[in-house]
């Protein structure tokens, strides 16, 4: 058990979890302005916990409310999740000022079929799909996120998590004031800079024995 509002407690709780780093697999070499980030995951009862530590020289966002287009407004941490037997998947975002975006897509091809101007509005789901805490450490050049995601917000059919598998990917938009474009990165080995490429997502296994989540 740990307190979700206590950064030191959260960090200790995830110390033994498998770290998975962000990368830019679609590039031969990392961009010179690339900043590292590491994500860890664990679970308890019917909830997935995702803890991200994001190196960032300039923590910035102009987002002002939940469910805005955060990736266009500044620094953003993104979570993609789908049970292996399910077609629908979710995309959750968190900003440095702890605002949340919640999207759900019927299947992997839906975005290609949907009208561009309508896709965002149709994919939005109600606020409260997940919760988050954010800690800003500008002196250390870092911000951290803990996302608390109920299985019911991801799964079409709710079942015990133990023994199940989900596909996952974590990504980020790293903005710097005065720089024209953000630096993007992902935990997935994407062949192209498109975070919805599910063929390259990882697999999250909810182990029965110790309550851990394996990446």
Image (cartoon, rainbow, N blue to C red):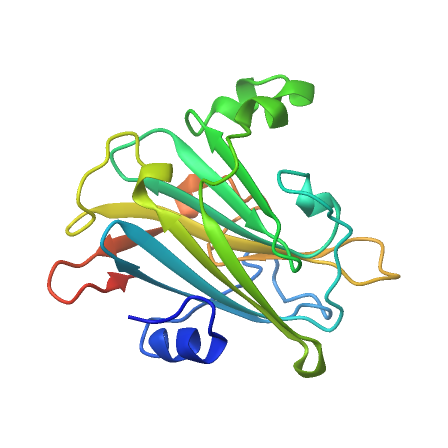
Q: Residue at x 68, y 39 (%)?
A: 69
Q: Is residue 16 left or right of residue 128?
A: left
The furthest residue to the right? 178
Q: Residue at x 26, y 62 (%)?
A: 214
Examine the rendering and report whether any part of residue 26 can be seen: no
Quadrant including the C terminus: bottom left
User: x, y (%) of residue 128?
Assistant: 48, 41
User: x, y (%) of residue 145?
Assistant: 53, 63
In the depicted view, which residue is nearer to us: 187 or 53?
Answer: 53
Q: Is residue 13 left or right of residue 95?
A: left
Q: Is residue 80 left or right of residue 78?
A: left
In the depicted view, which residue is nearer to us: 189 or 8?
Answer: 8
Quadrant including the N terminus: bottom left
In the depicted view, which residue is nearer to us: 208 or 26?
Answer: 208
Q: Is residue 107 left or right of residue 66?
A: left
The furthest residue to the left? 209
């Amino acid at each position: 058990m740990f307190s979700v509002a206590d950064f030191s407690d959260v960090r200790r709780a995830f110390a033994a979890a498998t770290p998975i780093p962000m990368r830019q697999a679609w590039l031969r070499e990392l961009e010179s302005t690339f900043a590292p980030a590491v994500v860890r995951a664990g679970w308890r009862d019917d909830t997935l916990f995702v803890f991200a530590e994001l190196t960032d020289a300039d923590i910035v966002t102009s987002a002002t409310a939940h469910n805005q287009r955060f990736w266009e407004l500044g620094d953003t941490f993104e979570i993609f999740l789908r049970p292996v037997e399910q077609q629908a998947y979710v995309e959750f975002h968190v900003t440095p000022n702890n605002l949340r975006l919640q999207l759900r897509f019927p299947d992997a091809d839906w975005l290609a079929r949907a009208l561009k101007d309508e896709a965002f509005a149709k994919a939005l789901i109600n606020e409260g799909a997940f919760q988050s805490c954010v800690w800003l450490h500008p002196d250390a050049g870092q911000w951290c996120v803990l996302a608390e995601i109920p299985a019911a917000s991801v799964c079409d059919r709710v079942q015990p998590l133990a023994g199940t598998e989900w596909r996952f990917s974590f990504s980020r938009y790293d903005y710097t004031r005065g720089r024209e474009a953000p630096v993007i990165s992902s935990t997935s080995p994407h062949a192209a800079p498109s975070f919805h490429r599910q063929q390259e997502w990882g697999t999250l296994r909810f182990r029965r024995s110790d309550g851990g989540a394996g990446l």
